[in-house]
Image (spheres, rainbow, N blue to C red):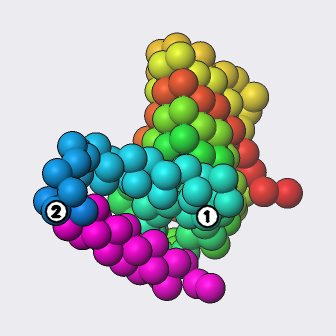
Amino acid sequence: MNKKSFNSMFWGIAIILAGILLIIDYYADLNISIIRMLVAVAFIYVGIRVLFKKQLFNSKGNIFFSDASYRIEEPEKEYSIVFSSGKIDLTGISEDAKNIKVKVAFGEGSILLNPNKPVKIRLTSAFGEGILPDGSAANFGTTYYKSKNEENKEYLTIDASVAFGEMIISYKN
């Protein structure tokens, strides 16, 4: 069963059950809080998705409550890794890419860089750990990294931030 049909089936059953409970509540004069029941069903849904490591609320460039990996060629402006583990591979990024923002919160993230593409990195950390390609680390505050640019190519600027998590930025071997 694919993700879309699971979601449709789950929410379809949840809505049908809510309707049945409304009818039972009306005719049997029970005190069932439909709002609480729907919130409970939503928590069950999220729990099932997390247990079975299904991607939850993921969209292009965003990773929430799951493990995922993206190989980026045509970059989005921003990537987020929240309560997750994720890898963003920038080794095949287009030459005209200029700015990328990557945020990690309560998770682990890694960014793989192309050694032939010059980069400028601004890494901000709050109660987390960020490790730059030269091995320097930021645990609280901001640190910078600038690669060599022998061919005078245009730099890729990465604005990275980590809060309550870990981010490792390194070159692909």
Name the residue that disc number 2 marks. Answer: 27
Q: Residue at x 28, y 69 (%)?
A: 20
What's the residue type where badge 1 is placed? Answer: Lys
Q: Residue furthest front?
A: 28
Q: Residue furthest right?
A: 173
Q: Position of residue 153 (x, y in %)?
A: 53, 61
Dominant secondary structure (helix, strand or loop) of the stretch shown in magenta: helix
Along the line of sight, the residue nearer the viewer: 108 or 131: 108
Q: Is residue 98 left or right of residue 135?
A: left
Image height of 106 relative to 18, above or below: above
Magenta span includes 6: yes
How far is mark 2 from mark 1, CA to CA? Answer: 39 Å
SS at badge 1: loop
Q: Residue at x 24, y 62 (%)?
A: 24
Q: Is residue 126 left or right of residue 90?
A: left
Sequence order check: which comes first, mark 2 or mark 1?
2
Q: Residue at x 53, y 16 (%)?
A: 127
Q: Position of residue 99 (x, y in %)?
A: 40, 55
For the question of whether residue 81 can be seen, the reply is: no
**Tag shown at residue 54:** 1
SS at badge 2: helix
Image height of 83 relative to 172, above or below: above
- Which corner quadrant of the image does residue 11 belong to? bottom left
Q: Is residue 107 left or right of residue 9?
A: right
Along the line of sight, the residue nearer the viewer: 97 or 146: 97
Residues at badges 2 and 1 in contact (C-beta under 8 Å)?
A: no
